[in-house]
Image (cartoon, rainbow, N blue to C red):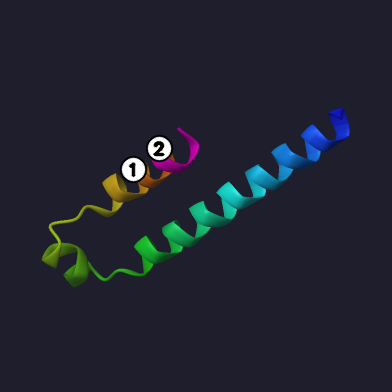
Amino acid sequence: MIFNDMISRTKSRIAKRRRYNELVSEILSLSDRDLADMNGNRTEMLRHVRQQIYG
């Protein structure tokens, strides 16, 4: 039972990290022009992603 909980938590952490890395990569790939068109701020977007994934 404890082992299964450990495995479950580890899988969850891996999934969160994978999703976080995907989103960060996507944000970092945006050009400055893309960000300007969206009125976006890369730093704020990265902060929001971290908050959304990790709380």
Query: Of helix, strand and loop, which mostly describes the magenta segment?
Result: helix
Q: Are marks 2 and 1 in contact (CB under 8 Å)?
A: yes
Residue 12 vs 30, above or below: the answer is above
Quarter that holds the N terminus: top right
Magenta part of the chain: 51-55
Q: Secondary structure at mark 1?
A: helix
Instruction: Give the spatial CA distance, label 2 vs label 1.
Output: 5 Å
Relative placement, left or right, of 22 versus 8 is left
Question: Which residue is tagged 2?
Answer: 51
Quarter that holds the C terminus: top left
**How many labels were placed on the picture?**
2
Question: Which residue is tagged 1?
Answer: 48
Amino acid type, label 1: His
Amino acid type, label 2: Gln
Relative placement, left or right, of 17 versus 23 is right
Determine which quarter of the picture holds residue 27: bottom left
Seen from this angle, which residue lies furthest front? Answer: 1
